Amino acid sequence: MRPAFWLALALLPTLAVAQPARAPKAKVTAQDPFSELFDTACMQHIGAPARLQSLMESNGLSPLQPAEAATLLQGQPGVAWMVPLASGRYAVSWADDGTCTVYAEKADAALVQKGFARLVQAAPKPLQVRSLPGRGPLSADQVAIQYGWAMPGQGRLQVRFRLVTRQAAEAGVQAMASATPGEAMLEQGVPGS
């Protein structure tokens, strides 16, 4: 691991400032660092990998070498970054299929689940939130939560969100959240942009 990556992520608050504004929320609640990073890196860049790349570069984060990124990308072509924060070690990946994923080495599962739900419940209008069944199989210490955003009256999703948390202290990753283009977005040709 390169120490400069960990130092550079002390700049996370500037990441949030650099993003386009989403629909105003009635009550702004402080987010846990994992949820804040997921919002900033993935939710604010759905279908916009070049903007995410620019954001990472502007914060001094260089992409990992392909061999280092391979595990995070789970065999998919794409790019990944280590994102060090004062609260812990994180990583962000963008696969060429449009999936953006955030990983946390250590995370409070209950806090992360609450933050994730709060983020996806704030779908931009006119999109509607749909709770989706979790995909398995999962180990006994894992919890998976899935949501989707869809246009009213449409069966196909614009975006699919997934969170997996693990309670085990020895787990290499205790939280993983992803945003993946849904069928409706894929038909529009948006994922890799």
Image (tube, helix red, strand yellow):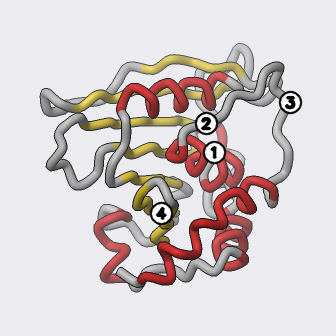
User: Which residue position holds label 1?
Assistant: 39
Dot 1 alpha-carbon crowd within 10 angstroms: few under 14, some 14 to 19, many 20 or more: many
How far apart are the alpha carbons under marks 1 and 3?
14 Å
Horizontally, residue 100 falls left or right of residue 166, namely right
User: Where the N terminus falls, by quadrant?
Assistant: bottom left
Please name the amino acid that badge 4 sits on: Ser
Q: Is 40 left or right of 163, judged from the image as shown?
A: right
- To which residue does mark 3 refer? 24
Tell me the distance, in whole angstroms, between the alpha carbons under discs 4 and 3.
27 Å
Rounded to the nearest whole Å, what is the CA distance between mark 2 and mark 3?
15 Å
Looking at the picture, which amino acid does disc 2 mark?
Gln
Residue at image location 50% in from the left, 59% down from the top: 86
Tell me the CA gap for discs 2 and 4.
Answer: 21 Å
Q: Nearer the viewer, residue 121 or 61?
A: 61
Q: Position of residue 145 (x, y in %)?
A: 40, 26
Secondary structure at badge 3 equals loop
- The earlier-in-sequence mark between 2 and 3 is 3
Q: Earlier in the sequence, mark 1 or mark 3?
A: 3
Residue 45, image quadrant: bottom right
